[in-house]
Each structure stands twice: as C-alpha cells, then as structure tokens.
Image (tube, helix red, strand yellow):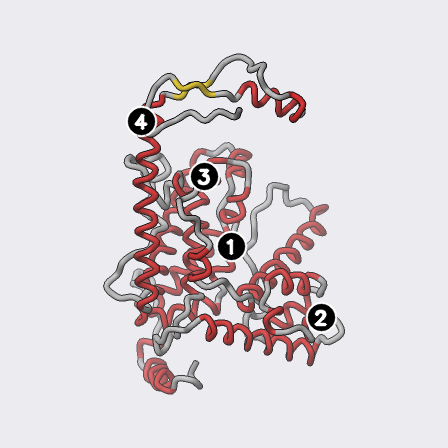
C-alpha cells in the first residue's frame, strides 16, 4: 500500500513519530486510546467466538448460566459485526479498516467458528440463534469484496475485479511452480480463470500436504506460520489417551483454516449484478419467514434480546452510486416481501387451517412406499374458514 500511495507513507511516518504511538495505550485504571480501540474490539470478538459453546455442550453441562452467557456473547458479536459493516460502508474508514481485517483473516475465522458451524446442525434453536450471525458474516464478506478501490474510492467494473483476481492467481501459480512444482502440476499449468474457480482450487489444495499449503500462504503474506485458527471446543474429556486425537484435530483445523484463507483470497465471487439476476421474481419461503431480514410485527423471543438486523442501511455516504442503488433495491425487495407475507398471514388466518385426524384411503398407494404413505395420511390439513384470496389446492 505504501508503494502505491505515497501520501499514506507520509501519514504513517507522522503518526509513528508522534508520542501517542509509543506510549502505552492501556494503563492500570486508564482508558484505551482511540488507535487501539478497534483492534482490541476485533480481537475480543475472536476470543469470545473461540470460547463459545454449542447447545449440545450446554445440555451436557446442565448449567443455565452458560446459556445466558452465550446470549450475551452473541449480542456482543452481532453489535461488533454491525459496527464493522458501518465502517466498511464509508470510504474514509474503509481504506484503513479493510486491510486490517484482511491481514488477520477476520471473516474467515468467523466462518470457522462454532456458532457458524452450528447453523447446519439439527437443533432448531441453535439454527435460529446462528442465522443472524451467518447473515452478518455474509454481509461482511460481500462488503470486503465489493468492487471499489479502497484508497481512491474509484468504482471497479466486473472486468477490473476479474483482472485483479486473475493477477492473484498468476502469482500463486508462479510460487507453486518455483517451490512446489511436483505437488501442484495441474494448478501450475491451468488458466487463471480456472484457478479462480472454487471447486478446482479446493480440489488441488486437498491433495497437498499441510506444510505446502502453509508455505504458499506464508509466501503470499496471507498468514503467518505462528497464526492459529479458532479452537473449537469438543465434548470429550482431556485424557492422556486422547493426545493423538487432539493433534489430529489441530492439524485438521489448521488445514481447514489455511485452505479457507487461500479460497477467500483467490476465488472470484459472483458480482452483485449476477447475484441479483438470479433472484426469483417473487420472494421465496426462506425469505418470507426469516425474522432477521423481514421482521414480524411483534418481537419474538429471539429478537427481544438483540437490536441487530441483517439489513442494508441507507447512509449519508455510499461507496459508489451502484452501492446506493443496490442497497435501495434490497430494501425495496424486503419491503415487498413484508407486504406479501402480511397478505398471506391474513388469508391463512381467515381460512382457519386445522390438522386432520385419521387416515385418507384415497391415496395412490402404488406410487409411494409404506413410510411415505403413512406420512401423507397423517399430514392432511382441513380448512374450516373462507377467504377471498385463499383457495385450497387438491392433489387430484
């Protein structure tokens, strides 16, 4: 950055020579300086994510206090992510914050945390609590890869973004050819567009040893050799017989972390225009009943403990004109989804649906197995009301 923008080098020289840079930022009973506040906030967020316990571990400990602790931890992390999103949405703070977040791989560590991984579990309560965190992390990754030049605030087109990622892929190929040509032959001689593909890059990194991946990431200045991933808490006891399993888990976490860092740096994400063009004309069920994107009229139990929503904001300043149009379009789409959901709720309430008790003997038994037949017979719904905009659909 200093080589590209000489003004930043002069500013850093003035800042580093000032007295506030050399004095201790945290003294006994003193306050943290402004320069150290944001890095400490980010590091604290990673620390609490590292100590987060899943619902299965809370059930094993049988402690009600830990459940309240997890709720407070999630509220703190949600608020921190919302602050980072606001700072990344302004050019004056984005040019300094984004390089720092990329240098510590903040978004990658969030995706490898316990709460992020628990989103795919079968516990509904955990899914609902993790849904907002996953959506905020996704918004953070989208903001990090938004097509704008950080220092000059110049918008980048899709071709310029692709050229930037192709240049990164070319650097990766040169380092792999120079130092590890025998282990990455397919990666070396592939086109840069193919290297930027997620499936191709992950398949080639999977066949390499951990030392090779760490060495490449270190030479690319993506990670340090001493940098460690977030340690996920496990349910087994810390016995001496489990030392080998612990080492294997550590190597597995290390490999997953470095692989995700390489993927985050080299894989070309689809542009916002491509993402919007794939959206359906009408909102899907997953969007209509998502309380964090389309909030209900009343506060649910999950929303009473938090004030954070995964919604774009219309600020006084935007990164580009396209950023303003994108935010306005998303908010308009969510507003339309809220109105559609309100009409659906009104029609369903007037229809008065009730579950049917008993069996339906009119099913076509030849087209389904025994389990599916039993499920279909017991899952029928009757409507005891009437609505002008509601009509019962028959399978016949």
Identify the mark nearer the N-term, 4 or 2. 2
Residue 35: numbered disc: none
**Mark toward the viewer: 2 or 1:** 2
Identify the element where label 4 is drawn: loop
Residue 181 visible to an observer of this rendering: yes
Could you say which disc has been placed on residue 186 in the image? 2
Q: CA distance from mark 4 to mark 3?
A: 49 Å
- Above or below, comparing residue 77 to residue 318 in the picture: above
Q: Nearer the viewer, mark 3 or mark 2?
A: 2
The part of the image, by quadrant, that contains residue 343 is top left
Distance from Cα at disc 3 to Cα at disc 1: 22 Å
> Which is more toward the observer, 283 or 242?
283
Q: Count the marks: how many? A: 4
Disc 4 vs disc 2: Cβ atoms closer than 8 Å? Answer: no
User: Marks 4 and 2, how far apart in space?
Assistant: 62 Å
* 356 sits to left or right of 363: left
Identified at 47% across, 73% down, the residue is: 159
Reading the chain from its start, which is encountered first: label 3 or label 1? 3
Badge 1 element: helix
Instruction: Name which of mark 4 and mark 3 comes first in the sequence.
Output: 3
Q: Where is residue 312 shown, x and y percent of the image?
A: 33, 55
Q: In the rendered view, would you say 357 is above or below 340?
A: above
Q: Residue at the spot x=31%, y=68% of the render?
A: 321
Q: Which mark is residue 388?
A: 4
Residue sitting at x 43%, y 61%: 142
In this image, 390 relative to 355: left or right? Answer: left
Q: Which mark is residue 111?
A: 1
Q: Residues within 10 Å of mark 4 (few under 14, many from 20)?
A: few
């Amino acid at each position: 950055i200093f080589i590209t923008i000489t003004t930043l080098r002069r500013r850093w020289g003035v800042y580093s020579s000032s007295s506030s840079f050399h004095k201790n930022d945290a003294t006994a009973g003193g306050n943290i300086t402004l320069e150290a506040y944001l890095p400490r906030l980010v590091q604290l967020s990673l620390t609490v994510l590292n100590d987060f316990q899943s619902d299965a571990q809370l059930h094993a400990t049988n402690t009600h206090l830990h459940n309240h602790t997890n709720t407070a931890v999630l509220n703190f992390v949600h608020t921190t992510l919302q602050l980072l999103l606001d700072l990344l949405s302004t050019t004056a703070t984005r040019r300094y914050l984004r390089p720092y977040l990329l240098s510590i791989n903040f978004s990658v560590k969030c995706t490898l945390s316990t709460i992020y991984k628990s989103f795919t579990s079968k516990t509904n309560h955990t899914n609902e609590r993790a849904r907002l965190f996953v959506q905020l992390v996704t918004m953070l990754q989208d903001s990090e890869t938004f097509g704008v030049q950080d220092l000059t605030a110049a918008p980048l087109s899709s071709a310029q973004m692709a050229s930037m990622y192709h240049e990164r892929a070319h650097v990766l190929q040169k380092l792999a050819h120079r130092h590890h040509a025998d282990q990455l032959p397919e990666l070396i001689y592939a086109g840069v567009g193919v290297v930027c593909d997620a499936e191709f890059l992950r398949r080639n990194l999977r066949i390499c040893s951990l030392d090779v991946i760490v060495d490449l990431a270190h030479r690319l200045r993506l990670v340090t050799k001493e940098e460690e991933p977030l340690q996920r808490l496990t349910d087994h006891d810390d016995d001496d017989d489990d030392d080998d399993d612990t080492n294997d888990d550590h190597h597995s976490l290390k490999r997953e972390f470095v692989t995700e860092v390489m993927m985050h740096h080299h894989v070309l994400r689809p542009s916002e225009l491509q993402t919007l063009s794939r959206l359906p004309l009408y909102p899907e069920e997953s969007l209509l009943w998502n309380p964090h994107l389309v909030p209900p009229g009343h506060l649910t139990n999950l929303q009473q403990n938090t004030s954070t929503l995964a919604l774009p904001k219309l600020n006084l300043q935007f990164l580009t004109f396209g950023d303003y149009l994108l935010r306005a379009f998303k908010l308009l789409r969510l507003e339309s989804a809220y109105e559609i959901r309100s009409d659906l709720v009104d029609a369903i309430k007037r229809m008065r649906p009730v579950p049917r008790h008993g069996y339906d003997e009119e099913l076509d038994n030849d087209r389904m197995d025994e389990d599916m037949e039993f499920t279909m017979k017991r899952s029928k719904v009757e409507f005891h009301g009437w609505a002008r905009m509601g009509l019962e659909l028959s399978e016949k």
